[in-house]
Image (tube, rainbow, N blue to C red):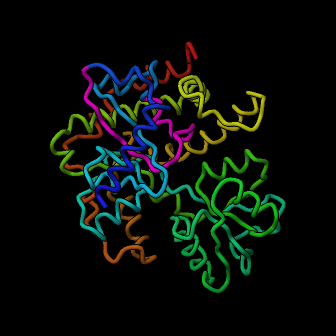
Amino acid sequence: MRNQFHRIFVLTLVLYTTFFLDPTYAAGPLKPVRIVVGTQTLNIGYPWLTLPQAQALGYWKEEGYDVQVVPLAPPAQPIALLLAGQADFAMVNGAVVVQAHALKNEPVKVAMLNGVTDWSIGVLADSPYKSVKDLKGKVIGTFGLASGGVALLRAYFQDNGMDPDKDVQIIATGSGAPAIDALRSGRVQALVFWATAMASYENAGLKMRYMRGADWRQIPDYSLSVMEKTAQTDPKMVEGIVRGMAKATVFALANPDCARRIQWKTWPSTKPTGSSDDKVLAKWDDNVLNAQLATLSDAFTMTGGKYYGNFDPAAYDRLQQFMLRTKQIPKTVPPSDYALQIPDFYGRANSFDAGAIKQASLKCSGW
């Protein structure tokens, strides 16, 4: 199994280095760092991972690191590569970190809490479905039956007095065009997806209305994970990587349009297709980016509103308690088990001139 993960990682890394990595970051006395991400393409929806690599910003280079952010398509799993020692960091859903502890007793730590649970139930704007109870007897589509949104959906129905096994039908539609077609054709009456996916469906012409559990966006999700041994051995490196991501978050929040311009100029292959009008394409990417930035902003507020990426034990406890209630894990662990044991880590990782970064973003010179 380890050899299989190694082959997958090496193949992905070769393809990524050939087509995506800016060559200016491959040379020099910089220490190599690998971050694996469970996505096929690092598009506009990952500004905290792409902007630190952009030559004009160079946040990670300033810290002394040559960072390779490697997108991994299924069946490769970022957490598996992290556990196997084939990556320094893995961007994963918070549930994956919880399962690593509760199911496998693995010392995986949260280096940076990036996002909240931003799934929602989407129905067509002109549909008669105004509340979750209106979906009784209907069909709901989602990416896959093992996706994180299914547990949220089932709990939401139960909280509203419905039996998710009898009162609704949940089917796998996949994402993208198949999900859009399923809703347009009436094969499903609602979709449950994460925020950037919903934004992309709006870009495809769907006019949507949304509903979600009141507590969903108070549950943490996307997180930068690292092994405890790595954090203990090289805390300076972990701090530098998180600081670069925090700077990128500040930059993107200050001026999303500038973040998009940098993305397009640095990695033109990630520019959306489907229109010959750059204004239309910009509108589409801005819609996706703003959906992601709302998630990042909510996470910042949820964890105290002082430090970007701050780990909040109470927030992770809400996540694991939800997973226990929905039988995704058999037990919980002390919330502090997920935390880095590095004194004043987030204070130091946020020790930069945020005002200067905001001004540079607003000016957006050269882009």
Quarter of the rendering containing residue 125: bottom right
Q: Nearer the viewer, residue 123 or 201?
A: 201
- Residue 330 screen position, x and y as percent: 34, 77
Question: Does the stretch in magenta take in 30?
Answer: yes
Relative placement, left or right, of 62 versus 260 is: left
Residue at the spot 26% in from the left edge and 34% down from the top edge = 348
Asked which quadrant contains residue 255, the reply is top right
The part of the chain drawn in magenta is: 29-52
Q: Examine the structure image and report whether residue 359 is included in the region drawn in magenta.
A: no
Query: Measuring 48% from the left and 58% from the top, which residue is drawn there?
Result: 218
Q: Is residue 316 above or below residue 366?
A: below
Can you give x and y, in whole percent of width and height, for residue 167 in the image? 67, 83
As drawn, 1 above or below 18 = below
Residue lying furthest bottom? 166
Q: Residue at x 73, y 57 (%)?
A: 180
Quarter of the picture containing the C terminus is top right
Q: Residue 23, relative to residue 109: is it above or below?
A: above
Closest to the observer, 192 or 349: 192
